[in-house]
Amino acid sequence: MLKPEENPPMIWPAESSIKDFQGTWWVAHTKSRNEKALAWQMQKKNISYFLPLTEKVYKKSRRVFRSMLPLFGGYIFFCGTESDRLEVLKTNRAAGLLEVKDQQHLITELLPIEKALTSGINLAPYAYIKAGQRCKVIAGPLMGTEGLVASDQNKTRLILQVDILGKATCLEIDSTLLEVVGEN
């Protein structure tokens, strides 16, 4: 396990901002646990990237361990030319690349994350649950219950269906108690 100071920088080139990157943005879907290794290789090839990392602290046998984990496991954002894209594919660390259709929208979404991380705020991964997804309750008295998620006036609701009757009921639930079980 790497010490926090042994990790690749979150942003390369260091001391820059993603808003200053030149070129086309792509998202590399990495092979399992290859995000940091790909970042190191991109740094050596001078390919601009953004790898948001978050600190994970845990105890084991009365010892405290700290490690830096990717905020979005399996993904690294990078910007460059077509030859940079090919270099990333040649590393054999990317399972595939996601094309970014709306370049400015991606930058707009990533800038607040960059700002929080460079300000020293530790972000935590959060399950992105959207209306229509099938979810399972992972804690509490309804643990194991599955249903569809609906969103209504900033409230998350779990819809419980009885297909044979063509009827359903719903309950309000905290979205942190839900886990996605499949796409609808």
Image: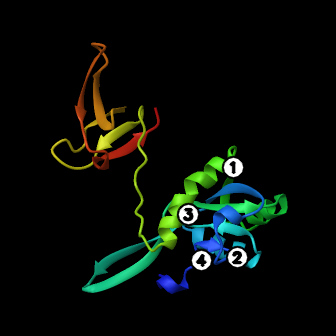
Residue ID at (54%, 85%): 6
- Mark 3: which amino acid? Ser
- Residue found at the far left of this picture: 141
Of callouts 3 and 1, the N-terminal one: 3
- Mark 4: which amino acid? Pro
* Residue 74 picture location, percent across and down: 55, 60
Q: Which mark is residue 103?
A: 1
Q: CA distance from mark 3 to mark 1?
A: 26 Å
Q: Are marks 4 and 2 in contact (CB under 8 Å)?
A: yes
Residue ID at (69%, 49%): 103
Q: Secondary structure at mark 2?
A: helix
Q: Secondary structure at mark 1?
A: helix
- Mark 2: which amino acid? Gln
Is residue 75 left or right of 92 when viewed as pictured? left
Q: What is the quadrant of residue 80 in the picture?
A: bottom right
Of callouts 1 and 2, the N-terminal one: 2
Q: Which residue is mark 4?
A: 9
- Mark 1: which amino acid? Gln
Of callouts 3 and 2, the N-terminal one: 3
Residue 101 appears anywhere in the view: yes
Closer mark to the observer between disc 4 and disc 1: 1
Q: Are marks 3 and 1 in contact (CB under 8 Å)?
A: no
Q: CA distance from mark 3 to mark 4?
A: 20 Å
Q: Which residue is mark 3?
A: 32
Q: Which mark is residue 56?
A: none
Q: Which residue is mark 2?
A: 43
Residue ID at (26%, 44%): 174
